[in-house]
Amino acid sequence: MAKKTTKKNTRTKAKPKAKSKKLSFKLSDQQKLVFGSLLIILGVLLFISFVSYIFTGKEDQSVLTNFPERSDAYKNWASQLGAWVSEFFIIKGFGIPSFIFAGLIFLSGIYVTLNLKKGKLRKHWIWGTLIVIWLSIFFGFFTHKYDILGGTIGFEMNHFFQDYIGKIGVALLLLFGLITYLAIRFKLTGDTFVNLFKRAKRDIKDDVTFQSNDEDTAVIIDNSLTEEAEAIKSAYEIPLDKSEPTEDSQPKPKVKTDTLKMEVDKKPVEKTVDIPELKVEVEATKEEKSETDNLADKLVEDFGLFDPTLELGNYQFPPLDLLKKYDNEGISIDQEELEENKNRIVETLLNYKIGISSIKATIGPTVTLYEIVPDAGIRISKIKNLEDDIALSLAALGIRIIAPIPGKGTIGIEVPNKNATIVSMRSVIASQKFQQSKMQLPIAFGKTISNETFVVDLAKMPHLLMAGATGQGKSVGLNAVLTSLLYKKHPAEVKFVLVDPKKVELTLFNKIERHYLAKLPDSEDAIITDNTKVINTLNSLCIEMDNRYEMLKNAFCRNIAEYNAKFKARKLNPNDGHAFLPYIVLVVDEFADLIMTAGKEVETPIARLAQLARAIGIHLIIATQRPSVNVITGIIKANFPARIAFRVTSKIDSRTILDGSGADQLIGRGDMLYTQGNDLIRIQCAFVDTPEVEKITEFIGSQKAYPDAHLLPEYVGEEGGTNLDIDISDRDKLFREAAEIIVTAQQGSASLLQRKLKLGYNRAGRIIDQLEAAGIVGSFEGSKARQVLVPDLVALDQLLENESS
Ligand SMILES: Nc1ncnc2c1ncn2[C@@H]1O[C@H](COP(=O)(O)OP(=O)(O)OP(=O)(O)O)[C@@H](O)[C@H]1O
């Protein structure tokens, strides 16, 4: 670790050094001009010296052998230095190709002066040097001594290679060098050569045609045009016509033809790319229609879109007048109360040395939110810890501190209003937000702290868990949910499965059984109050879910909305088993009771539905007044992201529902917290009284209905088919022993037999069935032990004796 740090340090320290080094090499613009022009002059001087050396080199040879002296007379145009440098580059170096170095130095001067990209200059130098070497060897190939063509290096290198690979080898090596250069530098490929060859062939052909006809140039050009070029011929006729009157154009017809011909070769290719008609073709393509689409379109044309509401075409939605108006609905601002609360908050905080820079109040139906901005440097946790102290000083229940308010830079203190106002169901149903909502299953829960109507989509939740202590507004909340849906959804679009173990809460909805309720085929009442029936209903819903998934799969749809849209567009054939699918909302009023009596048998199908049913339109609403962990288990919680908490009595309960405190600080009577996985929203639940629900259900119930409630698929429970005619001779060997154990313990459970007789589950289950057939134990009652019908061992003996006689 230490090593790493030191390494890092050295690296970070090394950076500025490198930078400063780089900086020292940077030239100012003036320096660049001076240095650049020096290079240009050097390049020119070198060029002059080299040129001069070609003519004067021989004459200067005698002087060059001596040590340079000022008095020596040089013929080179650049005198002594010119002769020396030229001798060095041309004779002792690379020969004539050394001119390229003069060019490179000149070019460098230009690059430096004009501040051009250095990368390119580097490339010129690399390629230039390679060309010098290649040319030097190339020239050296033809010479037999050191001369100005290939220089010493060219000659020596030739000799060196020839010793190893011979003259032919060197020639081929030079050819290979040339090809490599052309391929890399000019990106030439095999095709280029083929094309070049083809073009050359065509040129020769054209020339021959041209020479054979000396009449009119224009005609010849026409002949040489390919068919492709015909289309754009007109473009070339103009320059031809223009050129005719001018006299000097006359003597060079051949040159003109050549230029034109070259263009013709290229242009047709360009033209075909942007031929405008191509675009038109693309636009003209029409989407191909499949046979079913055509049929569906025709059906829609003839009969219109499928209307699922047609069967109850005259159905009237309940009017708003059925809902009650309340006197104390509108929010009244009590200035005195506001001022008082504000002063108390400020005072309490000051007592703990917490200064406030600003305070703002938002008045809601039941609580007022005071948003404060504390002075800089105050810890939020300090204010959060003062919750109880503020509650004490305000002498009020239900104070909740939100520190900080998500998305705002403030801390919120919610203080209950002295006079809470009722949020009527009428006001939320009448709100624009609800009336104009395009949600699949809109629910108007009530109003938020800023007095806005709170509408959410049950289809998006996709399941809802509701909890709260008794008498805090759960049943009213459930009624609000059902009322919202009744006001917005046609009986064809939504069906309710109501589970009401308390037997009295949802009975009012019996009146709308044939409009809105769904039930098992063999059951009399649609509202389920018996726990054993709940298990069958839940399993039946699971079958419905599987059926619906199969239908969606066959229709290539991903969810119920897509499926129904396709069905309405008559793209799905009812003869293939397709049908319009209504949403199904399962409401369980007292979930704790169910779990206590049926345990896993209820939890498993509920969890399965919760996990999978969202896409096919089955949504669950589960309410409980006992939010303990054995009721709201981990598996249930994981599948119910949307939760509502009414007031609960302990922080632990609040944590069970909301994964945090808050529900214990509510004030009851419909005051609730809603979460869909992230923020908590405080809402005053809309109030809908029993008489109002009664009026609505009566209104709906009095209208024409379907012949029966919506029927769910039949479910035959595993225990349902007990064969009561089990033959006595078929009884298990341990039958009598088992019967005695059961009667002695007065507990009809298979697990008791498993333990006492050390049996497997299946055998114990079979014995229990036989005991039932013999009339020793009662029928299956969910997870509860069966009732024992024989009071004691004497009675058992009698029963079995009577049986055998
Ligand atoms: N939204 C509300 N606005 C005003 N008062 C309400 C509201 N909700 C409930 N109340 C009051 O609280 C009382 C109890 O409500 P509710 O019957 O819904 O409680 P609960 O939680 O269902 O109780 P239980 O679990 O015992 O059935 C109602 O009779 C009503 O007076």
Image (tube, rainbow, N blue to C red):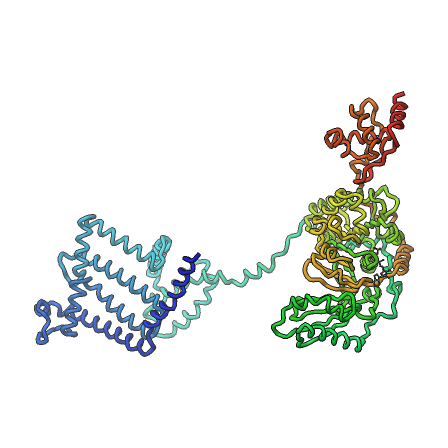
Question: 85 or 30, which lies in front?
Answer: 30
Left or right of 730: which side holds 377? left
Left or right of 499: which side holds 61? left
Where residue 384 sits in the image (x, y, percent)?
68, 66
Among all residues in the image, which is located at the extreme front? Answer: 351
Residue at the spot x=73%, y=66% of the render? Answer: 388
Among all residues in the image, which is located at the extreme bottom? Answer: 30
Residue 58, quarter of picture: bottom left
Q: Name above or below for residue 595 compared with residue 138.
A: above
Question: 789 or 68, which lies in front?
Answer: 789
Kindly tell me whether residue 417 is visible in this rendering.
Answer: yes
Looking at the rendering, in which quadrant would you find the C terminus? top right
Residue at the spot x=17%, y=61% of the render? Answer: 151
Where residue 450 sits in the image (x, y, percent)?
75, 70
Question: 691 or 582, which lies in front?
Answer: 691
Quadrant field for ligand 1? bottom right
Among all residues in the image, which is located at the extreme top? Answer: 805
Residue at the spot x=34%, y=71% of the render? Answer: 250
Question: 318 or 183, which lies in front?
Answer: 318
Left or right of 209: which side holds 400? right
Kindly tell me whether residue 433 is visible in this rendering.
Answer: no
Q: Name above or below for residue 113 compared with residue 301.
A: below
Looking at the rendering, in which quadrant would you find the N terminus? bottom left
Q: Name above or below for residue 319 compared with residue 784.
A: below
Residue at the spot x=77%, y=60% of the render? Answer: 442
Residue 89, quarter of picture: bottom left
Q: How many marks?
A: 0
Where residue 222 sits in the image (x, y, percent)?
42, 62
Where residue 704 sits in the image (x, y, percent)?
89, 53
Residue 215, quarter of picture: bottom left
